[in-house]
Image: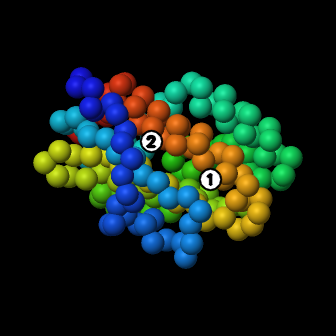
């Protein structure tokens, strides 16, 4: 597989994404993209589920540390979100609630007392199909802004590593 299919590069938020103008103010907005190989699924939900299901092993370690810390502040933990997913009344991708979906994009995320966030998984259908994962975060208070300051560098590492791992494993194919 060509090396450039494994490298997630930063890009501006896609203008046509459902999350680009979602919040009146954002404290974090980023997007990473990579080309998809020929034959990769055209369904953004399939791609999102694959990417979230095949994250690098070290991500679960980071999540355990995060959960230990945020539980002290009464914030939602991964365990809590997993429980919601198991007993879901709303559709979820992994631990994240689905907010919208279309032929080219699925938007997932979560709301909590300190911040709300949305993640867009957007598949372009141009001559070189691309997958772009964008995130926007709207903080509600000082706890949210402090939390974001601490996790933002990890968030960026996780997104890039998750895209890279999914590309290395091999994206699901259209049938």
Please report the residue visible at 67 percent of the width from the left and 51 percent of the height from the top.
149
Q: Which residue is mark 1?
A: 88
Is residue 43 in sight in this rendering? Answer: no
Callout 2 secondary element:
helix
Q: Position of residue 88 (x, y in %)?
A: 62, 53
**63 horizontally vs 42: left or right:** right
Work out whether residue 2 or residue 71 is closer to the camera in this orientation and state it: 2
Please report the residue visible at 27 percent of the width from the left and 32 percent of the height from the top.
5
**127 horizontally vs 34: left or right:** left
Distance from disc 1 to disc 2, alpha carbons, whole Å, reads: 16 Å
Is residue 153 in sight in this rendering? Answer: yes
When the figure is inspected, residue 57 is found, relative to residue 111, above or below; the finding is above
Q: Which residue is mark 2?
A: 49
Please report the residue visible at 77 percent of the width from the left and 63 percent of the height from the top.
142
Q: Quadrant of the N terminus?
A: top left
Q: Position of residue 25 (x, y in %)?
A: 57, 72
Callout 1 secondary element:
loop
Please report the residue visible at 45 percent of the width from the left and 65 percent of the height from the top.
19
Neighbor class of circle 1 (other Cα within 10 Å; few <14, some 14-19, many 20+) is few
Select label 1 or label 2 by which is in front. 2
Numbered tag placed on residue 55 in the rendering: none
Q: Quadrant of the C terminus?
A: top left
Q: Residue furthest right?
A: 72
């Amino acid at each position: 597989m060509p090396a450039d299919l494994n490298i997630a590069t930063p890009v501006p938020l896609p203008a046509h994404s459902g999350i680009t103008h979602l919040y009146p103010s954002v404290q974090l907005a980023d997007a990473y993209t990579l080309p998809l190989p020929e034959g990769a699924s055209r369904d953004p939900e399939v791609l999102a589920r694959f990417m979230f299901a095949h994250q690098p092993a070290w991500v679960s370690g980071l999540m355990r540390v995060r959960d230990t810390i945020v539980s002290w502040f009464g914030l939602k933990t991964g365990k809590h979100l997993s429980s919601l997913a198991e007993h879901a009344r709303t559709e979820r991708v992994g631990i994240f609630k689905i907010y919208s979906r279309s032929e080219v994009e699925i938007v997932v995320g979560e709301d909590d007392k300190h911040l709300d966030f949305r993640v867009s998984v957007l598949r372009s259908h141009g001559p070189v199909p691309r997958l772009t994962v964008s995130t926007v975060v709207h903080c509600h208070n000082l706890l949210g802004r402090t939390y974001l300051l601490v996790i933002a560098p990890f968030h960026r590492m996780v997104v890039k590593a998750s895209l890279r791992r999914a590309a290395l494993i091999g994206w699901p194919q259209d049938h």
